[in-house]
Image (cartoon, rainbow, N blue to C red):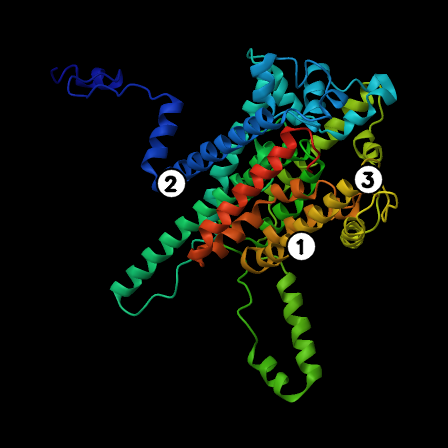
Amino acid sequence: MNPNTAELANAEGISDLAAPAPPPVAPAAAWLARLRSDSARMAAARESWRALWSSRALVWIAGVGTVLALGYGPQRKAFDPPGVTRGFGWLGDLLAAPAARWDAAWYLVIARYGYRPDLGSYTEPRAAFFPVYPLGVRAVSWLGAPPLVAGVALSTAALAAALYGIHRLTTLELAGGGRAPRGARGAGEARRAGEARAAETARLAVMLTAFAPMAFFLSAVYSESLYLALSVGVFWSARHGRWRWVGVLGALAAATRSAGLVLALPALAIYLYGPREDRAPDRAADAGERPEAAEGRARAPAARAAARVRAALRGLRPRYSIRSDLAWLALLPAGVIAYCAYLGLAGGEPLAPFKAQEDWSRHFAGPFVGVWDGLRAAFEGARQLLSFQRAHVYFPSGGGDPTIAASHNLMLFAFLALAVPAIVGTLRRLPLAYGGYVLAALALPLSYPVASQPLMSLPRFLLVLFPLSMWLAAWLAERPRLRRPALLACGASMAFFLAQFATWHWVA
């Protein structure tokens, strides 16, 4: 190159001295490189993978082993149509045992044949099963997998994503360290101790989720794992101010399960009150009482009461101002609206997803009245078992053996009783949006009980409420001696309930 051609070479982007451009990096390779360079992401991926494979190994070993030892059970042919969850040969039917029972048949039928609302009452109960999961099963089936295999693959992949998200959320919300001692060395020790405690809490959160007593549903042909992944994604996106993703994931969650509609409440709470990672609050939180309030406290009870009221009202003021990105939250009910519109245009009833609950014996009894009904059913169930007879039934019977129904009512109430301290702990330790989400999600099943079993399916509703696992992980992280017994108890309970599920006994 010489001075006469320098400008031309620069204009054309050519230089003898320029280094060759690096080859383009594939998006997958770039994502993997970012993952490896981030210790927090690598820890989440590593712990999530360990919880995933170990828990699923237990699921299939326990499920297949039970069927080999005890057989398929008496209800197999009475409920399951051939070719949906059976009819795949000796080995295929055996491997399907931990994954394809009860509601799985409905999802597989919908994935294969659709909702067919034009057939009227014959297919009307299908409307209670929301469409995103069966559509996902059908989409995976287009790749060549049988519907049952597609359902297991979709559920397992969603579980992996959910565990990863729970690990990241737990680290984000519960990564507080202890009070730092004086001096730089003491502060560093406190920071390292806090990081270690956060890592252990996150590890316990994914293990408790993967080995929960009903966690075998998370790899079965059920919508639990997909809904769990989507709801975790809503919280993660909201915490980081990605409101477009909050709207999209929330709409998919609401079209996966009816409870997804309540995700609008925690999303709005995080938007207005935080905590948020995307920007600082526009108004600081109230630090405490003002001097005049303290004086009033010393002078008169009326002044104290007035000060409390003023402080409560100040606490209701949003910490974040409303901007145009709030409009993305309007997408959350879009999935349900689209589903209802499809049913109406296809010749069915647009409100069939909600009316179909009557086909499954659910009725509105009042806000949280199911708690009282569940307590009464558990008491009558105990009377039934202690009477050592079947001729007289102490509670409204839905048919079948009254002693089995009584056992179910006692078991369901035990789950509710164990959930109460976890709910209280979530409200006290996690941000308000998490506890509010748990209460709002539980309001649905506890306000629409089933007459014969008021708390029916409650363990599955609790399974996807990940804030409860986050709180329990934080509680166990502070009590090292209880960690191993708690995980062993969870794993043993999961194997016990799975043995019933695999042999066509109703669990939840």
Depth check, front residue: 1 or 312: 312
Q: Is residue 1 left or right of residue 153?
A: left
Per the model, the C-alpha gap separating discs 1 and 2 is 34 Å
Indicate the amino acid at tag 3.
Answer: Arg
Determine the residue located farthest toward the front in the rendered image.
388
Q: Say which label, 3 or 2, has the lower sequence index.
A: 2
Q: Give residue 96's position: percent from left, percent from top.
A: 59, 22
| Mark 3: few/some/many CA within 10 Å (<14, 14-19, 20+) | many
> Given the image, on which type of amino acid does mark 1 rest?
Ala
State the residue position of label 1: 417
Q: Position of residue 501 (x, y in %)?
A: 65, 32
Mark 1 crowdedness (10 Å alpha carbons): few <14, some 14-19, many ≥20: few
x and y percentages locating residue 10 in the rendered image: 23, 19
Question: Given the image, on which type of amino acid does mark 2 rest?
Answer: Ala
Q: Quadrant of residue 273?
A: bottom right
Distance CA(mark 3)–CA(mark 2): 43 Å
